[in-house]
Image (cartoon, rainbow, N blue to C red):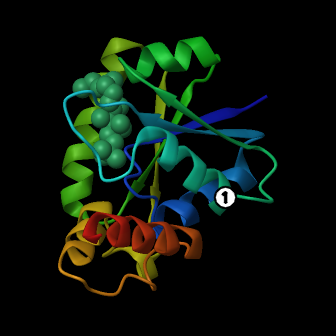
Amino acid sequence: MSIAVYPGSFDPITNGHLDIIKRASKIFSKVIVAILINRDKKGFFSIEERKELIEEAIKGLDNVEVVSFNGLLVDFMKEKEARIIIKGLRNSTDFEYEHQMALMNKKLNENVETLHMSTNPEYSYISSSAIRQIVSFGGEIKEFVPANVEMAIKNKVKINLN
Ligand code: PNS
């Protein structure tokens, strides 16, 4: 069985992430979306909220599982008996960062392979941080995130304003 792990912060999941998950799910027998638990950083959404939002967005993709992890990605991979890391590449800036990370993960565990998937050009300018920034200034994000995420963001902003 070929298991691929797609790690990230997913705060929140975007249409770009979703596209990578869908494409990976057609190639591998199982895809594990792994949300990094970062104790040093308070996110926009909690880890549990991010997990629920991803699960709702991927409904119908039966070979995709969503989990959270902390610590080293290579340790998580070992625990899941997975060897393949999937990462999306939007541009050359991503490449510099992702290439370094891939080399480091390889150094930490030589059995792990990172496969880079070029982002669909339609989504290549979308990032979670841009979404958070647009939301903070009251901008429209409908085009960039799954519908359930748009709704959750609107609800959260409403709660924070009250
Ligand atoms: O969506 P992001 O924030 O770019 O995802 C980064 C992530 C989660 C893939 C990366 O930070 C990660 O793998 N963190 C776990 C710690 C680790 O294993 N680091 C690699 C050695 S530098």
- For the N terminus, the image quarter is top right
Where residue 33 sits, quadrant-wise, is top right
Residue 140 placed where, x, y %?
A: 34, 87
The secondary structure type at the circle numbered 1 is helix
Where residue 29 sits, quadrant-wise, is top right
Where residue 158 sits, quadrant-wise, is bottom left
Q: Amino acid at mark 1?
A: Glu
Tell me the residue at 29%/64% (across/down): 160
Label 1 packing within 10 angstroms: few (<14), some (14-19), many (20+): some
Report whether 104 appears left or right of 115. Answer: left
Residue 17 placed where, x, y %?
A: 49, 60
Whether 70 is drawn above or below 38: the answer is: above
Name the residue that disc number 1 marks: 56
Tell me the residue at 59%/49% (across/down): 52
Q: Nearer the viewer, residue 48 or 6?
A: 48
Whether 72 is drawn above or below 51: the answer is: above
Tell me the residue at 36%/65% (across/down): 159
User: Can residue 52 be seen in this snapshot?
Assistant: yes
Tell me the residue at 58%/70% (across/down): 148
- For the C terminus, the image quarter is bottom left
